[in-house]
Structures are given as C-alpha cells and as structure tokens.
Image (spheres, rainbow, N blue to C red):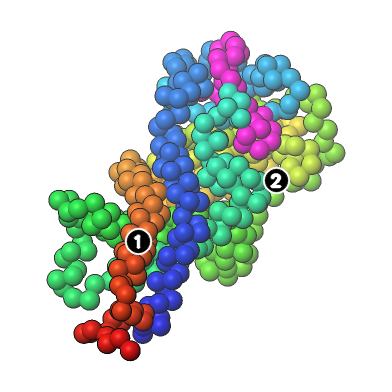
C-alpha cells in the first residue's frame, strides 16, 4: 500500500510539474472561449452587432450578395455564409477559405450589399485564443503537446483525489472547506486541495471530452462504443458533372429558400459552398434553437448548378454515436445548460489555472523545510533518512 502511495504521489508531483504550464494556458484560454458567443458582439460589433431590417422582401438575393462579397475580398474565394438570426434580427456574414487564422469574415448589408464590417482571422482574438488553446501556436507539434498534456492531466486528477482522500471524518471536515484566516502556507494548501476537489468532476469531464479533438483513435472509440462501428462520414460528393469553381455563380438563393421550407424552426443557418474537389454540392445546416439540448443540427444538400434538393441528413436519423459526438462540444464548453453551467465552468477553469502554481508552492515549501531539517543537524549528530538517534553520542 505504501509503495502504491509513493507511485501516485510521484506521478501527481512530476506530471504536474511537466504539464502544469500547458494546462494553465489551456485553462485560461478555455475560460475566455466559454463566453465567446456573448463577447463577440461586444468585441466586434461591426460583425455581430448593429440593427438589421428583418423584412425579407427588401433583401437582395444571396447570389447577388455573394458576388458583392467576392468583390470585397478579391483573390481569395469564399467558403460559405452564416446567417445569424439570433443577433438583432439577421446578420449575413461571409467567410473565406482556409484555416481559422487564415479566414476573413465579411458582413454585408442585406438590403444594399454594402460592406458593414470585415475581420481578418489573424486579428480575431477568439481565433487566436482557440489556436493557443488547441495548438499553442505550434501547429501539429503543439496539438500533440496539448493532447499528451490532457492525457497526463487525467492521471494528475485521479492521483490528486487519492492524495486528498481523508483517513477519518475529522480530517474530512478540514478537507471540504478553506480556512480563510490561516497563514499563507495553509491557505495555499487549502486552495490547491479543496479547490481541486470541488472542480474535479468538471475538470475530468473537460479532459475526457477534449481528447476527442486530439486523437482520432479516441474519437473513433466513441462510435465503436455507441454504434459498434466506425464513424460513417456524410459525403457531400454527389454524382454531378465535372465542376469548375472559377467564375461560377452559385444558386444559393434557390437552395436557401428550399432550406427555409424544410427547416422551418428558428436557428442560425450555415451555408457551405463546394470547393470543386472533395465537395461539389451546396450544404445548408441549421441548429434547432427549440431543441432540448444544444448542437442539434439538420443538414441538407443541394445541386450546385441548379440549386435543386439532393439529400437530407436530419438529426433524428443520425446514429447514437453521432448524437453523442455532437453533444461533446456543449459538454466541453459548458454550454449544455445555458449561462448557469457556463459560469460554473468559468470558475472551474480559473481554479484549474491556479492549481499548477499552488501545487508548485506546496512542493517548494516542503523542499525548503526538508533542507532546513538537514542543515539543522549539528556536529556529533547523525541523521539517516528521517531517523535521528536519541540521546548524545559519545566521542570516540
């Protein structure tokens, strides 16, 4: 039993020292991203705020708006369009191709086609926070580091619980509350042990869900667990004629009108345009705001030449594994029960960011104390391990 305790004590200490800084960065950036939807209109009002006339009869067709947006961002094709109906009526936001940091967001006036706002991905605070959160600004190398840190932190959390576990009821009472009037050393220990205990369930959930984006085997494991088979990817590649995207006008408006008829409930709409390579159909998806849980999305596919309907992928017909996979994001970000769980997650992430530092202070304090004990041994006294002989030693 003592050997087992030494092992998980060693793991808790040294894994915490190795990955503590990485997890502190992930916790701080994660706390920021929790309120991304609420902060966007405040940080970038030119993109996500401002009054828009909700009367659809006065709006330009989406085909025309797409052409206008293309002229505002010449040189880089547009990848798709977001119609944010939850922000002051409606907001039409076009996005360019590429990774998030490479994309630009263009907001157009739906009545005139005028450019209302533009935001480059490299200047988008939330894109930068996500890049730091997931990849540490180091691409695939950073992604591998954060993934390994996430795995290591699972061991840290479990070993921390074993170290926290009290031997009796009296000790339990002291480990469930912080002694605010104690000295700094005790206060630091309480902040680490008590704070870590109360945030443990949330941090475990965040780590377990975060691994989905780090490892393909973990993501596929979810589908094997709930479906008994690997993920069945929905292909947007249909039996259509050879597609050349240069100078092509997409029938976006026709597809959009059909999507509104087929998806009549309220919710933001995402329109993804074909790239002519892996995808040659227009995809329109809508998140159902009336659903009991978040991230309930229906997808429709349309012919990129005629705009005619091709195929539907309703949420109800998705596999159990896919439904669980869609719920992973709300579980990871704390949005599954609205603002209440977001606030709880936010507090937990701030505590998580402090744990590597409070733990380091505990270690340094004990190391300093041990050094003092060793230095305190005088001439004529011998110390072997933790044993000090009683009485005086006679000189020979």
Residue 257 position within the rendered picture, expressed as x and y whole percent measured from the top left: 59, 29
| Foreground of the two, 44 or 10 | 10
Residue 236, numbered label: 2
Q: What element carries label 2?
A: loop
Mark 2 crowd level (few <14, some 14–19, many ≥20, 10 Å Cα)? some
Q: Is mark 1 on a helix, strand or loop?
A: helix
Quadrant in the picture for residue 113: top right
Establish if 204 lies above or below 279: below
Residue 69 position within the rendered picture, expressed as x and y whole percent measured from the top left: 66, 19
Q: Going 22% across and 76% down the picture, which residue do you hit?
A: 167
Q: Going 27% across and 87% down the picture, which residue do you hit?
A: 394
Establish if 22 lies above or below 86: below
Kindly identify which residue carries mark 1: 368
Taking the magenta stretch, the answer to whether it contains residue 101 is yes
Q: Horizontally, is 88 left or right of 124 in the view? A: left
User: Range of the magenta residues?
Assistant: 90-118
Q: Going 65% across and 51% down the picture, which residue do you hit?
A: 141
Any part of residue 200 in sight: no
Taking the magenta stretch, the answer to whether it contains residue 201 is no
Residue 214 position within the rendered picture, expressed as x and y whole percent measured from the top left: 58, 56
Q: Going 53% across and 69% down the picture, which residue do you hit?
A: 225
């Amino acid at each position: 039993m003592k050997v087992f305790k030494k092992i998980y004590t060693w793991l808790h200490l040294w894994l915490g020292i190795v990955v503590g800084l990485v997890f502190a960065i992930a916790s701080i950036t994660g706390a920021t991203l929790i309120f991304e939807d609420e902060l966007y209109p405040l940080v970038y009002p030119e993109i996500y705020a401002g009054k828009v006339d909700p009367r659809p009869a006065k709006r330009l067709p989406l085909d025309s708006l797409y052409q206008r947006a293309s002229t505002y961002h010449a040189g880089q094709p547009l990848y798709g369009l977001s119609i944010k109906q939850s922000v002051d009526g409606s907001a039409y936001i076009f996005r360019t191709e590429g990774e998030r940091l490479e994309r630009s967001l263009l907001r157009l006036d739906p009545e005139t086609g005028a450019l209302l706002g533009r935001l480059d991905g490299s200047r988008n605070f939330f894109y930068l926070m996500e890049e730091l959160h997931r990849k540490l600004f180091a691409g695939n190398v950073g992604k591998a580091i954060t993934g390994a840190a996430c795995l290591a932190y699972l061991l840290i959390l479990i070993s921390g619980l074993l170290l926290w576990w009290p031997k009796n009821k009296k000790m339990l009472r002291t480990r469930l509350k912080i002694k605010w009037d104690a000295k700094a050393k005790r206060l630091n220990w309480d902040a680490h042990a008590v704070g870590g205990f109360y945030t443990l369930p949330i941090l475990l959930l965040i780590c377990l869900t975060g691994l989905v984006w780090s490892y393909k085997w973990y993501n596929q494991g979810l589908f094997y667990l709930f479906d008994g088979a690997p993920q069945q990817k929905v292909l947007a590649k249909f039996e259509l004629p050879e597609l050349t995207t240069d100078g092509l006008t997409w029938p976006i408006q026709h597809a959009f009108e059909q999507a509104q008829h087929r998806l009549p409930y309220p919710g933001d709409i995402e329109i993804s345009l074909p790239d002519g390579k892996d995808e040659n159909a227009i995809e329109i998806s809508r998140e159902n705001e009336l659903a009991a849980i978040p991230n309930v999305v229906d997808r429709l596919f349309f012919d990129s030449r005629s705009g005619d309907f091709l195929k539907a992928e309703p949420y109800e017909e998705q596999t159990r594994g896919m439904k669980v996979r869609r719920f992973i994001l709300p579980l990871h970000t704390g949005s599954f029960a609205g603002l209440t769980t977001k606030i709880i997650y936010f507090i937990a992430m701030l505590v998580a960011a402090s744990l590597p530092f409070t733990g380091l202070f505990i270690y340094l304090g004990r190391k300093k104390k041990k050094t003092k004990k060793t230095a305190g041994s005088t001439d004529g006294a011998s110390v072997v391990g933790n044993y000090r002989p009683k009485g005086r030693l006679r000189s020979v």
